[in-house]
Every structure is written in structure tokens, then in C-alpha cells.
Image (tube, helix red, strand yellow):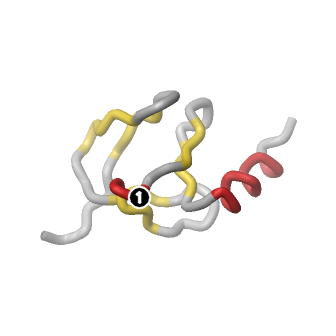
């Protein structure tokens, strides 16, 4: 099976798969994140993050 990007709706403690796939892309680094490894996301921005480092960068970039 080839790689396919999934479409998700991020919720507070889970995510809903809208379109089947095996990965999403990190909003900051562009790295592929396999769904089984997805641990970090932002519900308000509906963004996925590869690691806590990308979460930190997102907080700095989106600071108001």
C-alpha cells in the first residue's frame, strides 16, 4: 500500500479521521507523522506537530 495523507479533525483528547490515510504532515517542519505516532496537535489551529519542539515553535509563531 502506498503512502496516503489522512485528513483529521483534531479534538481535545482524540482525533477523528475524515479521510483515510496513514500519515499527516507537521504544520511547522513538514515532516510526515504516522497516525500511530501522532501525539501532538492544536485543536484551535487544527494543526499536527511532530514533537514538543515543533509545538514550542508554533506557540512562539502564533503568540498574540
Q: Residue at x 36, y 61 (%)?
A: 34
Q: Residue at x 18, y 71 (%)?
A: 2
Q: Residue at x 34, y 56 (%)?
A: 36
User: Please, which residue is most extreme toward the left here?
Assistant: 1
| Quarter of the image with the N terminus in it | bottom left
Left or right placement of residue 4 versus residue 24 in this view: left
Residue of label 1: 37
Residue 23: x and y in percent read 35, 59
Left or right placement of residue 1 versus residue 4 in this view: left
- In this view of the protein, which residue sits in the foreground, 12 or 2? 12
Residue 10: x and y in percent read 46, 35
Left or right placement of residue 25 versus residue 1 in this view: right
Left or right placement of residue 9 versus residue 18 in this view: right
Q: Residue at x 27, y 58 (%)?
A: 22
Residue 26: x and y in percent read 53, 59
As drawn, 46 above or below 51:
above
Q: Residues within 10 Å of mark 1 (few under 14, many from 20)?
A: few
Which element is circle 1 on?
Answer: helix
- In this view of the protein, which residue sits in the foreground, 53 or 28? 53
Residue 46: x and y in percent read 53, 38
Q: Quadrant of residue 3?
A: bottom left
As drawn, 63 above or below 4:
above
Total residue callouts? 1
| Quarter of the image with the C terminus in it | top right
Amino acid at each position: 500500500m502506498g503512502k496516503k495523507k489522512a485528513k483529521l479533525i483534531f479534538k481535545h483528547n482524540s482525533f477523528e479521521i475524515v479521510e483515510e490515510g496513514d500519515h499527516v504532515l507537521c504544520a511547522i517542519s513538514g515532516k510526515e507523522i504516522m497516525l500511530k505516532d501522532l501525539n501532538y496537535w492544536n485543536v484551535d489551529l487544527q494543526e499536527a506537530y511532530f514533537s514538543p519542539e515543533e509545538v514550542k515553535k508554533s506557540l512562539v509563531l502564533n503568540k498574540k
